[in-house]
Image (cartoon, helix red, strand yellow):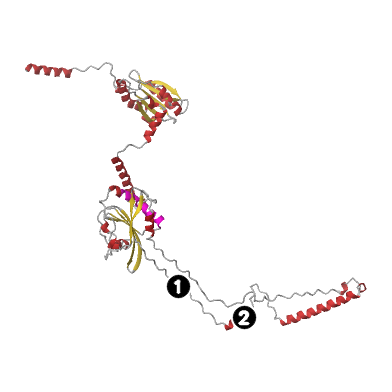
Amino acid sequence: MKIQVIFAVAIAFLSCTVQAAPIPGTVHPENISSAAELSGVWKDATAGSTVRAIKVSIINEALEEDGIFNIKGTFEQDYGTVHDNLTEKQPAYFLVRMDERSDWLFLCFVPDVAPIRQKMIYAATRASLTKDLGDSHFKDSIYGTNLADFTWDGYKKHRASLAAPKPLTDRERQLAEIAANEKIMIENMKGATLRKSHAPGMNFPLTDRAVDALKKLVVAKPAPKPVVVASALPKKFSSPASTPLPASPVISSEEPKKDDSAKTIDDDEWDDDEEKDKEEKKEDKEEEKVEEKEEQAEEPAEEPVIEEEPEVPVKVEEKEEQAEEPAEEPVVEEEPEVPVKVERTVNFVKLAIDVENEKIDLVTESKITANQVHKNIDGDAPRFTFFAYEHTHSGTEHDTLVFMYTCPSKSKIRERMLYSSCRAGVLEAAKVEAGLTVDKKLETTDVEDLTEDFLLEELHPKSHAVNSPYSNSGAGAGRGFSKPARPGARRVM
């Protein structure tokens, strides 16, 4: 027994002191580095613009240049050089210049049929080669085991695979959707100064039933009757046809007398008949003159013409008729009639999201009181509700349209995120398609909060005055502290 123990101790001592001899022919990847010639070729290729591709192989335990190929055409046309210079059973590296001068493509070909030792060395040396040459030069890299991977079709498939979405499980996809909706929700809950002008999130369209129900919340008021402003009627005038025209100046048709001395024709040249005719014409002219003078004597003297329009003379008979008619009393303006408000047939509209059809549909429409609002809203699922609240406060009648977004805590997370994303779109659609203008927006997680007292408190907040001699004047002066609401209960927008 003692001999066996001594023998085991001796073997252990010898194993610790004797160094293991290296296996002949073994090459470690960390011992392989780029040769000086390869570094010079790479420097010249990146500085110039004539080299299209460089083939690199491991020769004598060093990375050396195994071929240089110049540019002959475009990147697509010269890409076939790579496939033509690869051997089916020999691994190799290829450095290919792309169309851009400073962009390079790194290719690593390690066939499955190659010896295991070469496969391990080429796979392990790939990172050290790109590091020595400079990682910033390579825009993309391809690692392949088949020659078909290094054709132009293989390169296009490689680019398509990079652009394709990453494969996700259903759980990962749901988590990604929740993260995106939470990001949108956080953006919506920021201050008003950071809120975007457009409606964020998803915009599902409203169904025709929903639009018709929302339009019923708009009360159609009758158009007021046109008011005719009547004033005292002017005096009665005769028609233009019966009104005589103003007297016009008389134009004499008498010809100017000719001087007898101007006559150059002798009396003897005229016949007796012509003399008689002249005498008759003179007599006729004299008679006309006498008649015209008599008419002018009977007519009153004409007034001088003024630039203003002449007054229309009225006949004596018409003056007598106007004197007989009694004076008309002035008509008093009638006050416009106040339009009578038409009573609503519907004041409560509840909407829900139809997930299958991706639309917002009508759930119910009715006419209820303010105390019945919380009884008509679902307590286990989110809903969009419009309520036209007609009430009287401090002797004044109010007609307020309230929008309520209810999102119970016990509803599904997916529903909560979906409704939160569609809230702004519902308000925009109600304004554009139904013509609604929301006066107050409320949000709550507990439907029981939506009582009449709560609505009145939100619509007409009370100012709690503090009667203190130390209160400062200005904004917020004389205002007390309001009781904070419990977390997540409700939020006024």
Question: In the displayed structure, does residue 446 sit left or right of residue 213?
Answer: left
Q: Quadrant of residue 476?
A: bottom left
**Taking the image as drawn, is residue 329 in sight?**
yes
Q: CA distance from mark 2 to mark 1?
A: 37 Å
Please give the residue where the numbered disc 1 appears in the rendered image: 335
Above or below, 267 relative to 150: below
Q: Quadrant of residue 252?
A: bottom right
Which of the pair 204/367 is nearer the observer?
Answer: 367
Residue situated furthest right in the rendering: 268
**How far from the left and from the top, in percent, is residue 177?**
32, 44
Q: Residue at x 33, y 27 (%)?
A: 127
Which of the pair 418/124 is nearer the observer?
Answer: 418
Q: Residue at x 41, y 65 (%)?
A: 221
Q: Quadrant of the N terminus?
A: top left
Q: Quadrant of residue 18?
A: top left
Considering only order in the chain, which callout, 1 or 2, is on the residue closer to the N terminus? 2
Q: Main secondary structure of the magenta part?
A: helix
**How far from the left and from the top, in percent, is residue 48?**
45, 26
Please give the residue where the numbered disc 2 appears in the rendered image: 318
Q: Residues within 10 Å of mark 1 (few under 14, many from 20)?
A: few
Q: Amino acid at mark 2?
A: Glu
Highlighted range, magenta: 416-434
Does 431 lie within the magenta span? Answer: yes
Q: Amino acid at mark 1?
A: Glu
